[in-house]
Structure formats: C-alpha cells, structure tokens
Image (cartoon, rainbow, N blue to C red):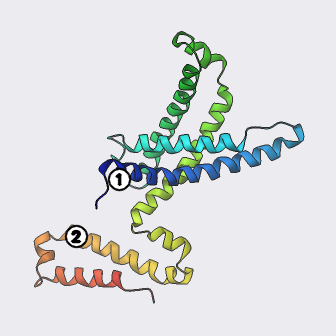
Amino acid sequence: MSKHPAIGFVIKEIKEMIPPTLFFAIGFNLILLTTNLILNKYQVKFSSFLLATTGALIVGKSVLIAQALPFFRRMDTAPLIRPVLFKTGIFFLAVALVRILERLIEFLTHGGKLRDISQYVATTINWHQYVAVQLWILTLFLIYTFFTELNNLFGDGELTKLLFTRRPSEIKQTRRQRIRALTRLNRLTDAHSMSELSNPATPAHSEMLRLVASLSKPPA
C-alpha cells in the first residue's frame, strides 16, 4: 500500500534536513568546545552545547527553506565554484534571517509588543556574538556546499566510495584514464550530431561505444 502523500513529503523533508543538521551540530559543538577551552582560564563560558545543537536545528530548517526557493538551482550548470558560492550565499542569508525571526517570535510569544521590537533588536541581541556566529556559519556552509556539490556531480554515492571504500592505488590507476575518456567523449558529442552517434555504421558510433566501454570497466 502506498504512503500518504503528506507522510511521504514529511519523510523527504526530514531526510533532507538530517545531513546539514548533523554537520552543523558537530561543527558548532567543536567551535564551542575549543572556544570554551581558550576562555577557561578567564572563567568565562561562551555558550552551552544545548544552544549549539539548537543552532544546528535552526540551520537545518533554513536549508530546507533555501532549497525551496525557485532560483536556488539556477547556477547548477555553471562551473562548480559558481553554484558553491551562490548556494552558500543563499544559505547564509536564509540562516541570518531565520535566526533573527526566531528571536523575534520568542519575544512576541513571551508577551512582547510589536511596537517594542526595534528596541528589543537594538538592546537585547548581542550583535557581536551574532556576527561572529554568522562568520562561522559562512565558513561551514562553504565546506558543506562544496562537498554536497561534489557528491551531486559524481552521483550514485561515488564520492562516499572514493572517501571510504576505494583504495588509493585503485583511484590512481583509473583516475587519469577515466578523465581522458570523459574528455574524449565530451569532444565526440560536440563534434557529431545525435543521428551520427546513434547510427551503428558510423565511426563516431564505434568510438562512442569504445569510450563508454572503457568507462564501464572495473578497476584493475
């Protein structure tokens, strides 16, 4: 029996939220730990691990909001650096906005008045700490987005295999050959039409099959 569409949507959203939440939970708590170790001799505590983990949840929600924007993937066909920087900027702005909105909603739900919001923002929010956290968020998002885009580029969990399962010797043996084959395949598709490539009687078709076969061979 198929799942209800609403349940499937919720499950999908939770799955998409888990990776950035875990990544930033680890990142925030590591930053917190090192900061508290540095400030320990001054008997100053920067924050708590609970607040750091809560911050990671806020980032996770912000990622879902950013990914739902209609222009989020407009740079997907550009060279890798452009979608990385573009999406990092969107994530950064989304988190900055959500962090402020969370504080304002908390203020209003605890009896605050709309007319007092400007005073609350000016006097209650620690802007030095806010900016410091945003700078770390920017740095972490650069790392997160870079590896996310690489994973999407390789596809089918290939990046995970490269990092955790394949031996360096296997990668060295096949990497150069695969890059050359992909480059030649790209040039072949640029130089010939689809009708030529699909016609078994043409040399272009034979060359295409040879290149595809070389890419499908298992590592030696």
Q: Position of residue 38 (x, y in %)?
A: 82, 45
Q: Residue at x 66, y 39 (%)?
A: 51
Residue 108 in the figure: left or right of residue 199: right
Q: Position of residue 148 (x, y in %)?
A: 47, 57
Would you call the spot at circle 2 few (<14 residues within 10 Å), some (14-19), or many (20 or more)? some
The residue at which mark 1 appears reads as 8
- Amino acid beneath label 2: Thr
Q: Residue at x 44, y 68 (%)?
A: 157
Residue 168 in the figure: left or right of residue 13: right
Mark-to-mark CA distance, 2 and 1: 39 Å
Front in this rendered view, residue 130 or 171 = 130
- Residue at the farthest front position: 1
Residue 119 in the figure: left or right of residue 212: right
Quarter where residue 151 is shown? bottom left
Q: Residue at x 34, y 78 (%)?
A: 181
Q: Secondary structure at mark 1?
A: helix
Against 162, residue 146 (above or below) is above
Q: Which mark is residue 68?
A: none
Q: Secondary structure at mark 2?
A: helix
Q: Position of residue 168 (x, y in %)?
A: 56, 79
- Residue at the farthest top position: 115
Front in this rendered view, residue 148 or 17 = 17
Residue 149 in the figure: left or right of residue 37: left
The residue at which mark 2 appears reads as 189
Q: Position of residue 133 (x, y in %)?
A: 64, 38
> N-terminal of the two: label 2 or label 1?
1
- Amino acid beneath label 1: Gly
The quarter of the image holding the N terminus is bottom left
Quarter where residue 202 is shown? bottom left
User: In the image, which is nearer the foreground, mark 2 or mark 1?
Assistant: 1
- Residue at the farthest bottom position: 220
Front in this rendered view, residue 160 or 65 = 65
